[in-house]
Amino acid sequence: MLSAADLLKTLPYFETLGTDAIEHITREVLEFSFARGEVLFLEGESCRGLYVIKSGQVRIFKTSPEGREQVLLVAKPGDSFNDVPVFDGGPNPASASALEESTIYLIPTEVALSLLTDCPIAVSILKLFAVRLRHLTMMVEDLSFRSVVGRMAKLLLDLAVVEDGPSPVRRLTQDEMAAMVGSVRDMIGRALKHIERAGAIKIEGQRIMVVAPEKLREMM
């Protein structure tokens, strides 16, 4: 089995690093063992760092409020995961648990970022990509767990000029809304009528006014 240093050299993040840099990271790496089904971390928790699998398998997943799960990734030996919060500074975007007995290396966030201290432009680029990847992860969650009505409620809140109180929605066609929530025009029309009957919005011709944002949040 590969040593920690040899395993790190196989990762795209570290494959161009010299021996001294690899040895520095290796000295800071933490090693953990997890039993089958044991949770490594939960969505929403503060990020501890970048995880690398030495042996075993780990599933990365999102969980809906009702308890439904959507697996985003099954990570295997040599794979790294939880990159997004390392570089964008946010919380864990998903949860992780061991599919079998697994040994995991954890590279603390500050150690991973220390490699970039002399290259601020690289930090900016990685942060931008991480923010966009987090957004895509949230889109997967919306498509997996929310109904069309729920996705429309979220979109209307996002499009509202102000977050609280009555607010006009930035104008989009129903075709454009359908593309943004992963549906079709007819379903968007029915969803808007449902939301209007619930008293959350008011539709006046091509204009949509959010009148009860708290009801939209409930529909999400």
Image (spheres, grey):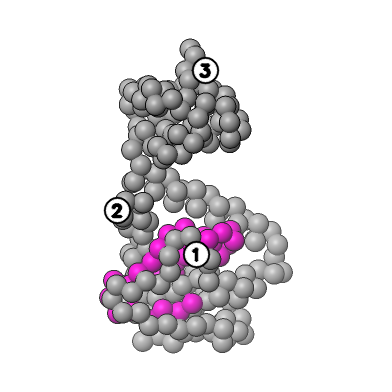
Above or below, 73 against 159 in this view is below
**Residue name at image x 40 percent, y 72 percent:** 40
Residue 192 appears in the picture as rendered: no
In-image side of 25 versus 220 (left or right): right
Which quadrant holds the C terminus?
Answer: top left
Distance, label 1 to label 3, CA atoms, is 39 Å
**Residue name at image x 70 percent, y 62 percent:** 120
Residue 157 appears in the picture as rendered: yes
Which of 37/84 is in front? 37
Quarter holding residue 73: bottom left
Estimate the x, y position of residue 208 in percent, counting from the top left: 50, 21
Q: Is residue 99 magenta?
A: yes
Q: Which residue is mark 2?
A: 68
Estimate the x, y position of residue 56 in percent, counting from the top left: 32, 77
How many numbered discs?
A: 3
The residue tagged with tag 3: helix, strand or loop?
A: strand
**Residue name at image x 35 percent, y 69 percent:** 97
Which of 183/123 is in front? 183
Looking at the rendered structure, the kind of residue marked 2 is Arg
Q: What is the magenta range? A: 78-106
Above or below, 53 against 186 in this view is below
Local crowd size for mark 2, using a 10 Å CA cut-off: few (<14), some (14–19), many (≥20):
few
Q: Evaluate if marks 1 and 2 touch, with contact meaning CB atoms under 8 Å apart.
A: no
Which quadrant holds the N terminus?
Answer: bottom left
Looking at the rendered structure, the kind of residue marked 1 is Glu
The residue tagged with tag 1: helix, strand or loop?
A: loop
**Precedes in sequence: disc 3 or disc 2:** 2
**Precedes in sequence: disc 1 or disc 2:** 1
Estimate the x, y position of residue 87 in percent, counting from the top left: 58, 62
Q: Which mark is residue 207?
A: 3
